[in-house]
Amino acid sequence: MDTERSIRDRLKKAKLIVVKLGSAILTDTRGALEEERIANIAASIDGLRTQGVETVLVTSGAVAAGVGCLGLGERPHAIHQVQATAAVGQTRLIDTYESAFGELGVHIALVLLTHDDVASRERYLNARSTLRTLLEMGVLPVVNENDTVATDELRFGDNDVLAGLVTNLLDADALIMLTDQPGLFDRDPRVHDDARLLRFEWAHEHGLNALLQDTPPGPFGRGGIASKVAAARLAARSGACTFICDGRTKNPLDCLHSPKAGGTLIAAKTTPLVARKRWIADQSSPKGELVLDAGAVKAVREAGGSLLPVGVRDCRGRFGRGDLVNCVDAHGQLVAKCLVNYSSEEAKKILGAASSKIESLLGYVSEPELAHRDNLVPTTDERARKSP
Ligand code: GLU
């Protein structure tokens, strides 16, 4: 049974986190970028990276920076003007990150996503592979919504929801949302003097529902308490815990390792891997079937390994990259369920081949495995079905 203490102890060992920066801490009320604060946050991120915590940054602030840059004085009202303003601000914003992280010797990469990119399975896998590859290359991905084509976060969210989705996408251990408040309060602290800072909450407890009534967002961002709670609940679906902390402090990311640091922790009742495996185990409509040879059955069932093309004898049905597929043995007995990295057409061309041959057989390579072990649940895996 998890307790606040066990959750905080687990978070001290986090390997991958998503940090979300809202417009309110990135810019002042006129839309000028807060360069010193950004440099301070960059130093905090770098500190975690040197301790082995991989980080993806989800940033807002493009609209706000565009307002400042164009001297508009306030956020435009028409959505197409907001989108155009974001396009102006985005370059300023990324420029500021480039210098802040450049000082620390960290390369950054800009990744603009829409909700469709993380909702459709195929695009989901593509976005995931790119982000993971950037992390493997030691590059810090900086994610924003692609505001010129999408308007979800412009209308509601200030990238809070996007940050939750990116957390799911990467199976990150934690999401840290840095805001201009010390954390989540039980009531709006700007209106109620006796508002109480919430230190620890379970993501799906009813207590948080009251906060979904919301308080009005600030002058630039479209976020607010409701979208923070929604993002935390989204993150919890893939087993990630969420911190909501003050981004203006000296060490804003201290919350991850130090329970005494301020902020609110919204805890998930499961871990990322268990959440993912349970989700796969619960899927009931496979799109196809892969027939495994005896070696692959053993590797998957007993050694918890990935499924490589070399161990696959036959491929049935029509499926796309990211679809759910059953793995069976030579007698048709179900061995595992998995999410595949290649479509059925591709799988047919590479089955029986060594992973090193994928490129010459297809003309490109996505992943060396047909299904990664994190996306594969053997029928013997009780863990995947256990309740938290
Ligand atoms: N993606 C937007 C940005 O970076 C959302 C924030 C807003 O609507 O102001 O600015």
Image: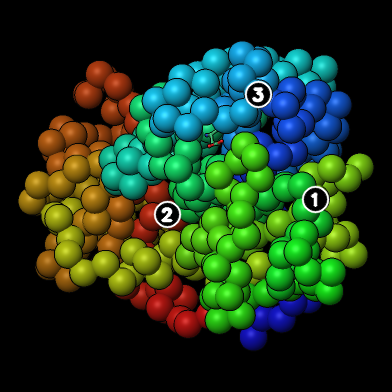
Q: Position of residue 40 (x, y in %)?
A: 85, 33
Give the quarter of the figure containing the N terminus.
Answer: bottom right
The one nearer the camera, 201 or 31, is 31
Q: Position of residue 198 (x, y in %)?
A: 76, 71
The amino acid pointed to by label 1 is Asp
Question: Disc 1 or disc 3, which is closer to the eye?
Answer: 3
Near mark 2 (Cα within 10 A), the count class, few <14, some 14-19 or many ≥20, is some
The amino acid pointed to by label 3 is Gly
What residue appears at the point 29 percent right and 46 percent down from the top-left corner? 121
Please determine whether, in this image, residue 160 is positioned above or below residue 206.
Answer: above
Near mark 1 (Cα within 10 A), the count class, few <14, some 14-19 or many ≥20, is many
Displayed quadrant of residue 3: bottom right
Distance (Cα) linking label 2 and label 3:
52 Å
In terms of secondary structure, where does tag 2 sit?
helix
Q: Position of residue 53 (x, y in %)?
A: 72, 44
What colour scheme governs how the chains and residues are painted in the rendered image of this protein?
rainbow
Please determine whether, in this image, residue 32 is positioned above or below residue 350.
Answer: above
| Residue on which disc 1 sits | 246
Please determine whether, in this image, residue 67 is positioned above or below residue 168.
Answer: above
Q: Are marks 2 and 3 in contact (CB under 8 Å)?
A: no
The disc, 2 or 3, on the residue closer to the chain's N-terminal end is 3
Distance (Cα) linking label 2 and label 1:
37 Å
| Residue on which disc 2 sits | 373
Ligand 1, by image quadrant, is top right
